[in-house]
Amino acid sequence: MQTDGIRWCRYPTRAFLAALLLSFAATGAAQQPDRATLPLEPGTPIPDDYYRAEFVILERIIEPEAVNERMSGRAVEEPIETEEVLWSALEDGTTETTLELAPREDLHLASAAARLERSGRYRVLLAAGWYEAFPPDYEGTPLQVEIGDWIDNARTREVEGHITIDRQRYLHVNVHLNHWQLAENAQALPEDETTELSQETPPPAGATGAEDTAPSSTTLDESAAQPLAVMAEPAPLELLTWIRETRRMRSEEIHFLDSPTIGVLVFFKKIEATE
């Protein structure tokens, strides 16, 4: 396992999660869906190295002031460009994914996610799974993640990043997530507030063709009285915590990757031809 993350006093949280997940394991896994529910055409043989990959991303309910780490000064690279989306929650509440996700009730981790929420200590931001073949030497495309609350005037979700699945001899999962908050010096603005720029304001250097773009039915005096709406700059963000971890997966074992405020449960179920 290779870890490039922050360390903190996790013992109370880990003890709680361990007890919770052990009790979940003792009650048995969620029912394996029959072959009719798999994303394969009827009569299609199940491929070799075929798995159901499952992820639960959760947020620990804690005040930001209680986080001891000071991450605001950490350098964070620009988001990678990827066409694959695990889950993206847009500003208007709609969601996007490029995967054919399995029903949540079919997931092995569905019961664990429900228990975590019922504990009152965690908020589940995402519970998703899908079927895919992961043969040896598989190089996965990063899967975009954008979840959590929408941060007003910053044009982003509070948790964003990507997850990548690779396989050499064993499956490996790389989790790269950022948990953002507004910077302390950020000035919160109303969502609909814009900066008004009238025609009396000198145009930017090199700007030309104003007469060509003005409607022919509008006089110069009329156009001068009409303000132009200019989008305000995004409010500055600072890093609250992050996860930077690569973990080797063992089939049918629950793995937990975490930071002081967010965590990721991972589970892989190998689908055999006899199932």
Image (cartoon, helix red, strand yellow):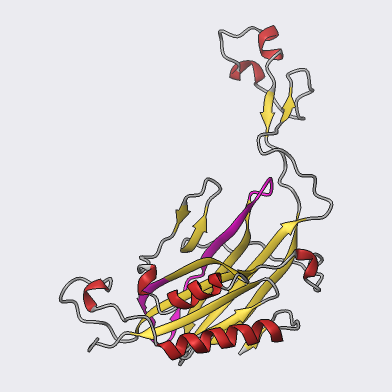
Q: Position of residue 186 (x, y in %)?
A: 80, 49
Residue located 67% across and 28% down the image: 229
> Relative to residue 226, is residue 204 drawn left or right?
right
* Residue at horizontal 74 percent and vertical 29 percent from the top: 206
Q: Report the residue at 19% width, 77% height from top.
A: 44
- Residue 144 inside the magenta-drawn segment: yes
The stretch of residues the image draws in magenta is: 129-155
Give the answer, above or below, for where 80 lies relative to 165.
Answer: above
> In which quadrant is the N terminus drawn?
bottom right
User: Residue 81 occupies which quadrant of the picture?
Assistant: bottom right
Q: Quadrant of residue 18?
A: bottom right
Front one among 255 and 233: 255
Q: Nearer the viewer, residue 254 or 77?
A: 254
Q: Does the magenta stretch include residue 127?
A: no
**51 relative to 40, above or below:** below
Quarter holding residue 219? top right
Q: Quadrant of the C terminus?
A: bottom left
Q: Which residue lies furthest to the right in this view?
A: 185
Percent of width and height locating residue 274: 22, 89
Q: Would residue 201 be found to the left or right of residue 208 on screen?
A: right
Q: In terms of depth relative to the viewer, which is nearer, 62 or 146?
A: 62
